Amino acid sequence: MAGEFHVDIGPQYEGEVIRKEDVYVEFGGPKVAHKFELATLKSAAEIENEKVEIIGPDLNALAPYDATTGKGGSYPLAVLVDVAGSQLDKDAEPIIERRIHMFTNMIEGWYHMNQRQDIWLRMSKACYKKGFTSLRELGEIYNFLFTSELPIIEKIQTTLITDDKKVAELLPKALKIYEARDARARALKDEDVDTFYGCTLCQSFAPTHVSIIAPNRIANCGAINWFDGRAAAKIDPEGPIFAIPKGKLLDPVRGEYEGLNKVVQEKSLGTYDRVYLYSAFEHPHTSCGCFQAIVFYIPEADAFGVVNREFKGETVIGETFSHMAGDTSGGKQIEGRLGTGLEQLRSPKFIQADGGLARIVWMPKEVKERYKGVLQAKGLYDKIATEEDVKNVDELLAFLEKVGHPWLKGEVKLPI
Ligand code: SF4
């Protein structure tokens, strides 16, 4: 395989992190407004098999990152993977899309983080020096890996767009597709199914992490819901996403299931033997590094805040998302800290054992606006502080008192 490409490819590169000083260029990430990845099922006739198209400047036309000044080298990117296959249906799209994460990380000198509209890819200087001077090679590697690792894909074409205007133009369409996927899953409850799904795709970075995907619990990365888990286990039974018979319900409030405990013990190599799906305390879900947001405990208020990856400022406890992410990630169970998909804010079981959404007291303004509907429905919209209302915990406590937050007033009864 290495003979066909300028760099080596294999699972041994999956844990490779490309540090700032080694970056040649990066795509997406926090400095770039427009970026996304999308897999689309098409008919065989619509696909020119193994075609790679680059729209916008290619690698050799992009100025590299300047390590001396710490400037430049960050560019927009859309990764569009179109597939066809007689056995494939629309359910497979999110799963194929999520494999972009794994396949990019299998390339020597490449690194991929996050998902959907939050992608962040890095290419190393060493990789460029080895002759990887065109994104065409990245597209060819995707085409090769997708068809060899997922034989259910019969035809594939990959488009890589670095033209900012074009990425910005296509982004709203992608956002609509992500939203439709999430909306479909909202109708289903954990009680409605016997099988949950597990994902260990991120174990290369977080060896003891297992994402549990249930109807009321989207994966930490926010990219895989229960339907996606089901589709993944079907199209690639040997792959990183697998079915988990949920087994006996041991604790309906905290969300402890016999089947989940067994799987967590197996897949974390005995590090953990219990997991609660609906609580941030005692045996909380582990967090890898791809989570969309962090739910964090604020001791002074005995309540929680939520911060998303895009929020660049300091949270109410004086820490930024990236600082907190360092302490939260790595596949550990940390009481009072949960890496989470943002869609969880809509889940009726979201930290239900701890008081649910009614125990959230702070979140960035942008998240509050995005989830305005669900917050209003629960009478919480005016009760939650943002960075515009308070700057520290003292101000938060005064704010909560002023607005009469239901948790602080003792109106929220824990269901235990
Ligand atoms: S965050 Fe979880 S579900 Fe998403 S890819 Fe990683 S392990 Fe899988």
Image (cartoon, rainbow, N blue to C red):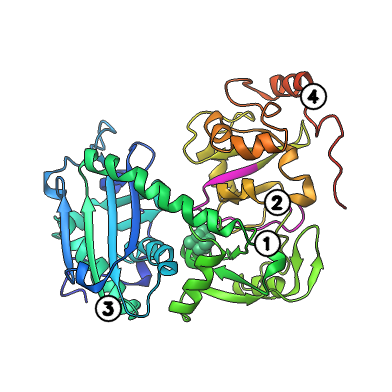
**As drawn, is 301 to the left or to the right of 171?**
right
Lower sequence index among marks 3 and 2 = 3
Lower sequence index among marks 3 and 1 = 3
Which residue has dot 2 on it? 348
Q: Are discs 3 and 1 less than 8 Å apart at CB?
A: no
- Quadrant position of residue 151: bottom left
Q: Are discs 2 and 1 less than 8 Å apart at CB?
A: yes
User: Is residue 274 shown above or below 292?
Assistant: below
Crowd tier of the residue under label 2, counting other residues whose Cα lies within 10 Å: few below 14, some 14–19, many 20 or above: some
Residue drawn at (34%, 37%) of the image: 33
* Mark-to-mark CA distance, 4 and 3: 59 Å
Which residue has dot 4 on it? 404
Which residue has dot 1 on it? 189
Callout 1 amino acid? Lys
* Mark-to-mark CA distance, 3 and 2: 40 Å
Residue 215 in the image: state x and y as whole percent: 62, 62
User: Is residue 42 shown above or below 316?
Assistant: below
**As drawn, is 288 to the left or to the right of 108?**
right
* Mark-to-mark CA distance, 2 and 1: 9 Å
- Specify the segment rendered in magenta: 279-295
Callout 4 amino acid? Gly
- Quadrant position of residue 316: top right
Crowd tier of the residue under label 3, counting other residues whose Cα lies within 10 Å: few below 14, some 14–19, many 20 or above: some
Callout 2 amino acid? Pro
Indicate whether residue 167 is drawn in magenta: no
| SS type, badge 1 | loop
Q: Are discs 1 and 4 less than 8 Å apart at CB?
A: no
Residue 154 has which mark? 3
Q: Are discs 4 and 3 less than 8 Å apart at CB?
A: no
Look at discs 1 and 4 and give the one toward the viewer: 1
Residue drawn at (64%, 30%) of the image: 317
| SS type, badge 4 | loop
